[in-house]
Image: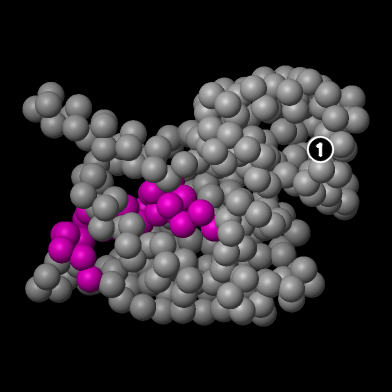
């Protein structure tokens, strides 16, 4: 199924500031909760996850890669897809000077190819461009624009790493969850990859992949505990509020230094 949405949104900011925000995947996508940028691979390639559900703390998380920002003329282009092409995304952003500042023109397509999504048609499925723009970006972009006047590229919200067996990993993550409270944990071994989304210190979303098999929730926990491989574990701070706060603090410090 393909979802498409195009719209124009006016902001009382000059085009370079709006362009700067859209060119920063950390700030542009992460506040939506549905497309989360985890790690920079190159200047135009990023590890991401897709969460297609209304309740972003539940359901299936899909790993993928985001390509962009690619500049073509005055446009900024992003393309993304999940690992097995269950989800494909294409976004074009254009910028036009208007009397009130800048008109941000977005053309966004999302295509799904996975039987599981049939269960989430209608209000339950939220990885649609219209939902992301109207429910998330329209309200949050003005706040972000107020603090974006410099480049913040290459920032990795990787808090810490560890190498542990599956049996050691779960107690370790539970301990860290009490301190960090909101984060995404990714573990990778030779035979398995898992994601645990921590929200308010609780495990809200657990997904383990081994070969072509995916398990979720308590079943995934058992799979991880029983896996004797050594996992490389990364804990990422992907809280949009934390990102905004960090950037605001840096901008404030920069202002004091002038």
Q: Nearer the viewer, residue 103 or 178?
A: 178
Residue 188, percent from left and from top: 75, 33
Q: Which residue is mark 1?
A: 221
**Which image quadrant for residue 170?**
top right
Residue 7, percent from left and from top: 36, 78
Q: Quadrant of the C terminus?
A: top left
Q: Is residue 42 visible?
A: no
Q: Residue at x 47, y 42 (%)?
A: 239
Main SS category, magenta section: helix
Q: Is residue 41 above or below residue 119?
A: above
Residue 227, percent from left and from top: 88, 30
Residue 182, percent from left and from top: 53, 37
Q: Residue at x 67, y 27 (%)?
A: 174
Q: Nearer the viewer, residue 154 or 49?
A: 49
Q: Is residue 55 above or below residue 92?
A: above
In the image: residue 240, left or right of residue 234: left
Q: Residue at x 87, y 52 (%)?
A: 212
Q: Nearer the viewer, residue 179 or 66?
A: 179
Q: Which scheme is used to colour this image of the protein?
A: one colour
In the image: residue 150, left or right of residue 233: left
Q: Which residues are magenta?
A: 10-34
Q: How many marks?
A: 1
Please tell me how crowded label 1 is: few (under 14), some (14-19), or many (20+) other residues with Cα within 10 Å.
Answer: many
Q: Is residue 246 visible?
A: yes
In the image: residue 177, left or right of residue 76: right
Q: Quadrant of the N terminus?
A: bottom right
**Which image quadrant for residue 169?**
top right
Question: Is 171 a magenta residue?
Answer: no
Name the secondary structure under disc 1. Answer: helix
In the image: residue 203, left or right of residue 247: right
Q: Is residue 198 above or below residue 64?
A: above
Q: Residue at x 68, y 72 (%)?
A: 120
């Amino acid at each position: 199924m393909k979802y498409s949405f195009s719209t124009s949104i006016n902001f009382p900011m000059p085009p370079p500031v709006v362009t700067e925000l859209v060119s920063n995947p950390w700030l542009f996508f992460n506040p939506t909760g549905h497309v989360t940028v985890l790690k920079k691979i190159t200047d135009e390639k990023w590890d991401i996850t897709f969460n297609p559900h209304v309740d972003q703390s539940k359901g299936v998380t899909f790993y993928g890669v985001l390509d962009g920002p690619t500049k073509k003329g005055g446009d900024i282009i992003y393309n993304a897809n999940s690992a097995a092409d269950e989800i494909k995304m294409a976004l074009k952003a254009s910028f036009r000077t208007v009397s009130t500042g800048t008109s941000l023109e977005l053309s966004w397509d999302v295509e799904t190819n996975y039987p599981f999504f049939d269960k989430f048609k209608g209000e339950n499925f939220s990885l649609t461009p219209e939902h992301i723009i109207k429910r998330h970006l329209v309200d949050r972009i003005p706040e972000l624009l107020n603090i974006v006047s410099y480049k913040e590229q290459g920032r990795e919200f990787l808090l810490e790493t560890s190498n542990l067996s599956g049996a050691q990993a779960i107690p370790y993550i539970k301990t860290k969850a009490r301190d960090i409270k909101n984060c995404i944990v990714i573990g990778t071994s030779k035979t398995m990859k898992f994601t645990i989304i921590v929200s308010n210190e609780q495990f809200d979303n657990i997904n383990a992949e081994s070969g072509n098999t995916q398990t979720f929730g308590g079943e995934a926990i058992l799979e991880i505990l029983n896996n004797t491989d050594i996992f490389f574990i990364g804990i990422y701070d992907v809280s949009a509020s934390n990102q905004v706060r960090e950037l605001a603090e840096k901008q404030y410090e920069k202002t004091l230094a002038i």
